[in-house]
């Protein structure tokens, strides 16, 4: 997937590579380098020149768990039982002007996520979770809103994704292109040697 990410008053090119079952790599191009976040099926890692280093770093704790969950190619709802996830229907409610089904997912790790599905289309329009970002003692509320769905290769995909931390907008992704079944070498997901 290619697109743009707007964060902290800047708009930057974004490329995401994903491969079944749980490989993921995101690259954000900056004026002075490239931020890389990846999950290789076992280890979450990052290269972030904005933090003063081009050396790959293992991502710790709660932040690693977030990256692991995000790397699930099919998403948390597909084959949820085989992943050890429990789903509870909280109920039907309003989210803005839409009727939604509110689902509570409890992952095998114990992490709880809330999914809000459009009652008419069944599409995910919001997820919410209390997360340990590793950047403070308290858990933070991470909300992700998906909109602007378009059909790509017979699959409905959001082309606008907004992320909020404790109600404050952190980033907005605008998808400009999606390519399915492109050849991707597994080595791009592995953390480079230091």
Image: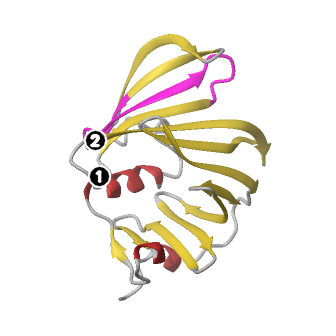
Residue lying at 55% horizontally and 62% vertically, measured from the top left: 19
Q: What is the x, y in percent for residue 27? A: 57, 69
State left or right for residue 43 relative to residue 184. left
Q: Give SS at disc 2.
A: loop
N-terminal label among 2 and 1: 1
Compared to residue 42, the image places residue 54 above or below, namely below
Where is 123 relative to 56, above or below?
above
Which callout, 2 or 1, points to the residue nearer the camera? 2
- In the picture as drawn, the residue positioned furthest to the bottom comes out as 194
Q: For the N terminus, which image quadrant?
A: bottom right
In which quarter of the view is residue 7 placed?
bottom right
- Labelled disc at residue 139: 2
- Residue 16 on image: x %, y %: 61, 63
Q: Which mark is residue 144?
A: none
- For the residues labelled 2 and 1, say whether their Cβ atoms are less than 8 Å apart: yes
Q: Which residue is mark 1?
A: 62
| Between 47 and 8, the one nearer to me in the picture | 8
- Residue 169 position, x and y percent, is 54, 42
Please give the name of the residue rendered at 62% of the width and 44% of the height, measured from the top-left corner.
Answer: 161
Q: Residues within 10 Å of mark 2 (few under 14, many from 20)?
A: some
Q: Residue furthest left?
A: 137
Of 167 and 79, nearer the camera is: 167
In the picture, measured across the screen, residue 52 lies left or right of residue 106, that is right
Give the magenta-colored segment's residue range.
105-123
| Local SS, label 1 | helix
**Cα distance, mark 2 to mark 1?**
9 Å
Structural crowding at the residue carrying mark 1, measured as other residues with C-alpha within 10 Å and reported as few (<14), some (14–19) or many (≥20): some
Q: What residue is shown at x 44% (from left), y 33% (from top)? A: 128
Q: Is residue 127 left or right of residue 111?
A: right
120 above or below 12? above
- Image quarter of residue 96: top right
Between 73 and 111, the one nearer to me in the picture = 111
């Amino acid at each position: 997937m290619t697109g743009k990410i707007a964060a902290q008053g800047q708009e930057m090119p974004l490329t995401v590579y994903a491969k079944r079952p749980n490989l993921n790599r995101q690259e954000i191009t900056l004026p002075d380098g490239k931020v890389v976040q990846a999950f290789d099926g076992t280890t979450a890692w990052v290269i972030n020149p904005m933090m003063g280093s081009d050396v790959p770093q293992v991502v710790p704790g709660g932040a690693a768990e977030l990256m692991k969950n995000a790397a699930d190619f099919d998403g948390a709802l597909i084959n949820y039982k085989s992943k050890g996830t429990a789903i509870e229907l909280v109920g039907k409610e309003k989210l803005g002007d839409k009727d939604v089904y509110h689902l509570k997912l409890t992952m095998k790790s114990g992490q709880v996520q809330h999914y809000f599905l459009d009652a008419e289309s069944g599409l995910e329009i919001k997820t919410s979770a209390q997360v340990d970002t590793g950047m403070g003692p308290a858990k933070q509320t991470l909300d992700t809103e998906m909109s602007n769905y378009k059909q790509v290769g017979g699959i409905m995909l959001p082309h606008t994704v907004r992320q909020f931390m404790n109600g404050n907008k952190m980033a907005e992704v605008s998808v400009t292109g999606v390519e399915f079944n492109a050849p991707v070498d597994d080595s791009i997901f592995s953390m480079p040697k230091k």
